[in-house]
Image (cartoon, grey):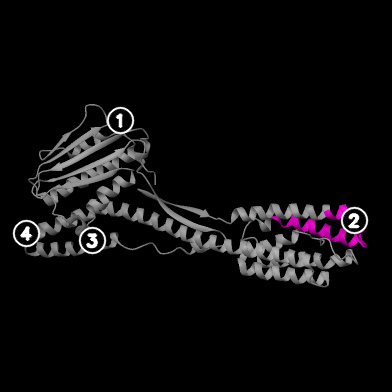
Amino acid sequence: MAKRERVMRMSVELPLWRALTGYRVLTMLYAIAIFLHARDTYGRPEVAYVFLAVLAVWTLATLPRVAGAASCTKRFLTADLTVALTGILLTPVAVPGREGGPTLPSIWTAGAVLAFAIKGGWRWAALASSLVAVANIVQRGAPTKDTVHNVLLVCIASIAIGYVVEVARASERTLARALEIEAATRERERLARDIHDSVLQVLAMVQRRGNALGGEAAELGRMAGEQEVALRTLVAGGLVPASRASDDASQGALVREVEVAEDPAAQDNTGPCDLRTLLSPYAGCRVTLSEPGAPVLLPPADARELAAAVGAALDNVHRHAGDDAQAWILVEDWTDEVIVTVRDDGPGIPEGRLAQAEGEGRLGVALSIRGRLRDIGGTAELISVPGQGTEVELKVPRGKAART
């Protein structure tokens, strides 16, 4: 099987940058409209003309800068805030003697402060809004009621947005880490199933045969048993280490997920697969297969996983019930689901043995059976009575298989 890594980038703040881009353009037009409406009251309108022309060019030329956190650098933020502060301080020059009214940049100034908030959080927002407050007080000459009101409004709004951005980034990183762990866990479970169905089975067989033969074979069996325990421990534990890229707040959190491509031969067959053809090799002198007369059609991936779970159940019969145990496979094809039952006449499973085996790293039932059914949206139920054998019921709903 070929593996492919898919990288997804999540960014909850991207809509905020887009909104800021629109806000800057609209407030630039608003500042120009206010000036044109009241230009007759300006003592030196040429100052306003020059500044607003610079403001318009600056706003339109720097739109790519406010498209995301990566392009919105500290140098740009400093220059942007300087434009806003310059416009505030030039207002008395353009309109000498006027005590009230808006400043030259008007509410465009809030956009510069919001850029600080989205980029750096509430602390950056507090710094930028404080500088704007000082500039407004200097421009007015004294802290008037309107000035204090407007300054507090910008300060509180920007700090609140900055705090929300910080919380959103922390939640984003936590979610990205959880998704990364989930993807790694699914991949580890898939590898554990494959290893359990192949390598671990061989090592267990070598251990049993070596102990039975004795001599040098017993030593070989002992070594195989040690390797089996080590391999079980390896596939059963450990979380994927945190990715550095997942903590890159400037670009949004990264989620890496390993996808496993099916065998080319399996990919060529995109139509439904007859489950009976996959189960027929299991039939033999010790295994009786009872199936419907009509094809039991399932998606190829679901059919393969279900057949592999049946094989794992039969391996457990052979290992724990002995070579002389008899097993029966019953396939039921219903309208809404397919049910496969595997039953044996072995000694059964003692109470608590499955939990003990899982704690020891023996995950045949947990991964090779239940894990496979869970991945395709099905369920696996195990019923065992000591002395009366074991029954494993595998159910796969039609059309509800999870594609994870």
Give the alpha-carbon distance from disc 1 to disc 3, as whole Å: 38 Å
| 3 or 4: tag closer to the N-terminus | 4
Marks 3 and 2 close (CB-CB < 8 Å)? no
Give the alpha-carbon distance from disc 4 to disc 2, as whole Å: 105 Å
Q: Is residue 283 left or right of residue 23?
A: left
Q: Is residue 330 above or below residue 164?
A: above
- Observer-side mark, 4 or 2, equals 2
Circle 1 residues within 10 Å: few <14, some 14–19, many ≥20: few
- Observer-side mark, 4 or 1, equals 1
Give the alpha-carbon distance from disc 3 to disc 2, as whole Å: 81 Å
The residue wearing badge 4 is 213
Q: Residue furthest top?
A: 293
Q: Is residue 286 left or right of residue 170?
A: left
| 4 or 1: tag closer to the N-terminus | 4
Q: Which residues are magenta?
A: 34-63
The residue wearing badge 2 is 39
The residue wearing badge 3 is 359
Q: Main secondary structure of the magenta part?
A: helix
Q: Secondary structure at mark 4?
A: helix
